[in-house]
């Protein structure tokens, strides 16, 4: 089995191995922070040395490392204002104050900040991926229950599920987010941050993330319900009759016969839902969560550079491509049994 796998994907495996080896070599050759700082001008060196022995800090050093490339920005405040920037790559240090070096330095800086490097899961790309993954996971679970309720022969249960789906599909996700984050705490007299330790510096962000996850999961559940319902109803009705003839009750028929077959039919639509949620996750800027979009907007506002949206687009494309590849493999795996 393993030999067949390696034979089938030998070219891809070799290509990935070569890329990894090149990246590891470049990472090993990458100049360190001290080496970048040692390239500063004599005047800047004097300011850095003076700042180290002074209680009043006038030198700001920003250092960002992205595995194979790094970036250092050194600036001073006060009467003698100076600014120097450097990029380290393949064992060499390049000035990044102008031209191509400046562009590369900005890209490294922006990408580092949007990925949330050196920070917890409440920042950047990590937040976007975590929110999207948990949303779709809870959305599918909730959607399955709603779908089963909607196609149930119990009229009250069916109407309640239909009303839920109609409401969440018929109102904007942004408004739903506002209701969960602002209205619900206002009505019931609590704050989302109170769910976490008051001494936790990230309590506000964790509270906002919890509210966003609830709003997104409730919304996704409505869409996933229709995905699950259509997949279940696409199964030939003869299988229901055959299951009944074998003595199976409704629950056994659904769990053992119908739902397992429905899973592979809903994978493409769940994949589309995942991609949609990934892009809709940018709405969390409205409650100040630091996702890719929020960080890139903040960088643009503070630094006045519209180049920040280039790495933002690339990061979204890479995440979409990665999860698209995963869902494609899952779909092909299940289609074998069609």
Image (cartoon, rainbow, N blue to C red):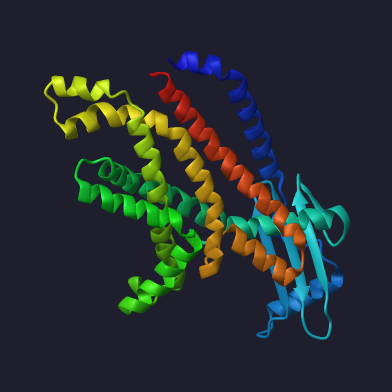
Of the 4 image quadrants, the one containing the N terminus is top left
**Left or right for 17, reference 60:** left
Does residue 55 show up? Answer: yes
Q: Residue at x 69, y 83 (%)?
A: 54
* Residue 218 % position (x, y): 38, 56
Q: Residue furthest left?
A: 247
Residue drawn 46% across the image and 28% down it: 331
Front residue of this view, candidates 87 and 244: 244
Which quadrant would residue 240 be assigned to in this image? top left
Pinpoint residue 219: horizontal percent, then vertical percent.
41, 54
Give whichever of 12, 329 is nearer the camera: 329
Q: In which quarter of the image is the C terminus?
A: top left
Is residue 190 in sight in this rendering? no
Please identify the residue farthest to the right as the structure is shown.
99
Q: Which residue is drawn at 63% across and 60% down?
A: 113
At horizontal 48% and vertical 38% (from top left) the residue drawn is 271
Q: In the image, is residue 130 above or below residue 271?
A: below
Q: Residue 42 vs residue 335: left or right?
A: right
Residue in the foreground of this view, choosing between 10 and 44:
10
Count up the numbered dots: 0
**Image quarter of residue 322:** top right
Residue 321 percent across, percent down from the top left: 59, 39
Measuring from the top left, give residue 186's x and y in whole percent: 37, 78
- Up-down: is 321 above or below 101? above
Q: In this view, does 69 lie to the left or right of 138?
A: right
Q: Is residue 126 above or below residue 140?
A: below
Front-most of 319 and 252? Answer: 252
């Amino acid at each position: 089995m393993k030999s067949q796998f390696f034979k089938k994907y030998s070219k891809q495996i070799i290509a990935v191995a070569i890329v990894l080896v090149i990246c590891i070599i470049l990472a090993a050759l990458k100049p360190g922070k001290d080496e970048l700082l040692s390239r500063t001008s004599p005047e800047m060196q004097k300011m850095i040395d003076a700042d180290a022995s002074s209680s009043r800090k006038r030198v700001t050093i920003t250092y960002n490392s992205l595995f194979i490339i790094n970036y250092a920005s050194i600036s001073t405040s006060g009467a003698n204002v100076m600014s120097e920037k450097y990029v380290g790559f393949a064992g060499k240090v390049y000035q990044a104050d102008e031209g191509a070096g400046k562009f590369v330095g900005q890209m490294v800086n922006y990408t580092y900040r949007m990925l949330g490097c050196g920070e917890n899961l409440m920042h950047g790309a990590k937040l976007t991926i975590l929110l999207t993954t948990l949303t779709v996971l809870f959305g599918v679970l909730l959607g399955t229950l709603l779908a089963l309720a909607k196609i149930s022969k119990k009229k009250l249960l069916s109407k309640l599920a239909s009303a839920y789906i109609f409401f969440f599909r018929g109102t904007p996700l942004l408004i739903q987010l506002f209701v969960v984050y602002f209205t619900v705490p206002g009505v019931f007299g609590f704050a989302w941050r109170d769910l976490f330790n008051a001494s936790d510096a990230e309590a506000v962000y964790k509270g906002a993330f919890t509210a966003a996850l609830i709003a997104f999961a409730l919304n996704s559940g409505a869409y996933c319900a229709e995905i699950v319902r259509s997949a279940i109803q696409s199964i030939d009705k003869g299988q229901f009759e055959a299951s009944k003839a074998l003595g199976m009750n409704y629950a056994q028929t659904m769990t053992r016969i119908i739902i397992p077959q429905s899973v592979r039919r809903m994978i493409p639509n769940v994949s589309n839902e995942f991609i949609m949620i990934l892009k809709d996750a940018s709405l969390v800027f409205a409650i100040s969560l630091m996702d890719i979009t929020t960080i890139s907007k903040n960088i643009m506002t503070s630094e006045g550079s519209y180049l920040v949206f280039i790495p933002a687009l690339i990061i979204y494309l890479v995440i979409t491509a990665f999860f698209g590849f995963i869902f494609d493999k899952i779909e092909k795996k299940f289609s074998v049994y069609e």
